[in-house]
Image: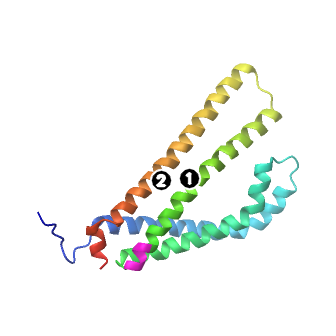
Amino acid sequence: MPQTFNVGSRSLFVTITAWIFIVVAGLTTLSAVVQNAATGSLMAGMQAAPGLPLISKLLIAYLPWVVGATLALSLATLISAGGLLMRLEWARRVFIGLLVVAIVANLAGLWLQQEVVQSLVSATLTRAPLPPQAVEVFGGFVTASRVMGALVTLGACALLVWVIRRLMSPMIRQEFA
């Protein structure tokens, strides 16, 4: 049986996806601008603090680069989501590419999540020795937070893969022709 497409119809999926990403990218852009303004004073205060773990020092060293990359990616997402709303083919392709970048960054961030939690745990345990019963409870909370962080990240990646698949479907691609 041949597949029939409705010519000229606009899918609700593309409209809702575009608006969600316009709002999120707009808020992220605003946040990155504010963070960029506050980065200088934050870095000066944090570098003066003695006894920071290595991961914290690395995060501080790369903070301006991360904020700049966040600003660039959020602006690109904002522009491509606007183009997606107008059903422009280049915007659909750029948007899919940005979603792939987001998936890769989230998966790479799994390692960073685990390192930050480990750094916080080791800093906490060295500064405040806990009784053995409290260490077991604390360890359970740490494990639960690590597992939940990983599950949320993987769930977000799965959601982005689903959005990419929908945007690449023949019916959605036909809207952008």
Residue most toward the left? 1
Tag 1–tag 2 contact (CB < 8 Å) = yes
- Colouring method of the image: rainbow
| Percent of width and height locating residue 70 | 61, 67
Q: Magenta-highlighted stretch: main secondary structure?
A: helix
Q: Earlier in the sequence, mark 1 or mark 2?
A: 1
| Closer-to-camera residue (116/127) | 116
| Relative vertical location of residue 116 with respect to residue 98 in this rendering, above or below | above
Is 7 situated left or right of 98 in this image? left
Please report the residue visible at 31 percent of the width from the left and 64 percent of the height from the top: 13
Q: Quadrant of residue 15?
A: bottom left
**Residue 51: horizontal and vertical position, in percent?**
86, 46
Image position of 95 with respect to 108: above or below? below
Q: Which residue is mark 1?
A: 107
8 sits to left or right of 41: left
Q: Name the residue type under label 1.
A: Leu
Res 136 quadrant in image: top right
Question: 15 and 113: which one is in front?
Answer: 113
Say which residue appears at 69% left-offset and 69% top-offset.
36
Q: CA distance from mark 1 to mark 2?
A: 8 Å
- Circle on res. 157: 2
Q: Quadrant of the C terminus?
A: bottom left
- Between residue 130 and residue 57, name the one nearer to us: 57
Give the residue drawn at x 19%, y 76%. Answer: 7
Specify start and end residues of the magenta stretch as a single range. 89-93
User: Circle 2 — which element?
Assistant: helix
At horizontal 42% and vertical 76% (from top left) the residue drawn is 91
How far across and how far down the image is residue 174, in percent? 27, 74
Q: Is residue 55 magenta?
A: no
